[in-house]
Amino acid sequence: MTVEKAGEEPLELVRDAKSKWALKGHENRQNDGQIQLFLTALTGLRAAAWAGEIKPEYGLDQPSLEIKISYQSGEGKREANIKFGKANSGNQHYGMCGEEEGVFLVDDEQFNTLKSSLKR
């Protein structure tokens, strides 16, 4: 899984031989607690509302956070790409998943957990 934040170098989150999640190349600086919070937020991600079609003002062409997930399923290797753009006046963040059409909104709390640093 790759986590890209605006203005920062991408981080690769991988499972090691013991199925523990690790920041590739940053294992000695990773924040295990924050990684677990990130994974919990990602697997529990729920849209607060539906925003509809993509609009330029949502900022999805220059995402503030992008999460690229590669995984194995019964059908073979699959990928999912989740992008987050700007926040609206209610502190909800516009997001989209490459597998779906349209834009959803997530609450600030979910977004901030996903955007938090995975390193110490």
Image (spheres, rainbow, N blue to C red):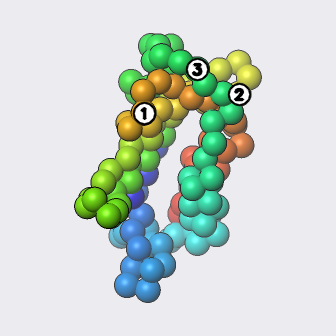
> Which one is closest to the eye, mark 2 or mark 1?
1
User: Farthest front residue?
Assistant: 74
Q: Which residue is drawn at 25% across and 61% down?
A: 76
Q: Which of 76 and 6 is in front in this view?
A: 76
> Which one is closest to the eye, mark 3 or mark 1?
1
Q: In what element is the residue under mark 2?
A: loop
Q: Could you tell me residue 59's position as x and y percent? A: 47, 22
User: Would you say 95 lies left or right of 113 here?
Assistant: left
Quadrant of the image for the C terminus? bottom right
Tell me the residue that label 3 is attached to. Answer: 51
Q: Which mark is residue 100?
A: 1
Q: In what element is the residue under mark 3?
A: strand
Q: Could you tell me residue 69's position as x and y percent? A: 38, 53
Reply above or below: 96 against 34. above
Work out how far the residue at label 2 is from the one at label 3, CA to CA, in angstroms: 14 Å
Q: Nearer the viewer, residue 49 or 12?
A: 49
Reply above or below: 42 against 30. above
Name which quarter of the figure residue 41 lies in: bottom right
User: Farthest bottom residue?
Assistant: 18
Q: Which residue is drawn at 56% across and 53% down?
A: 42
Q: Could you tell me residue 119's position as x and y percent? A: 53, 63
Work out how far the residue at label 2 is from the one at label 1, CA to CA, in angstroms: 23 Å
Q: Which amino acid type is marked by label 3? A: Ala
Tell me the residue that label 2 is attached to. Answer: 91
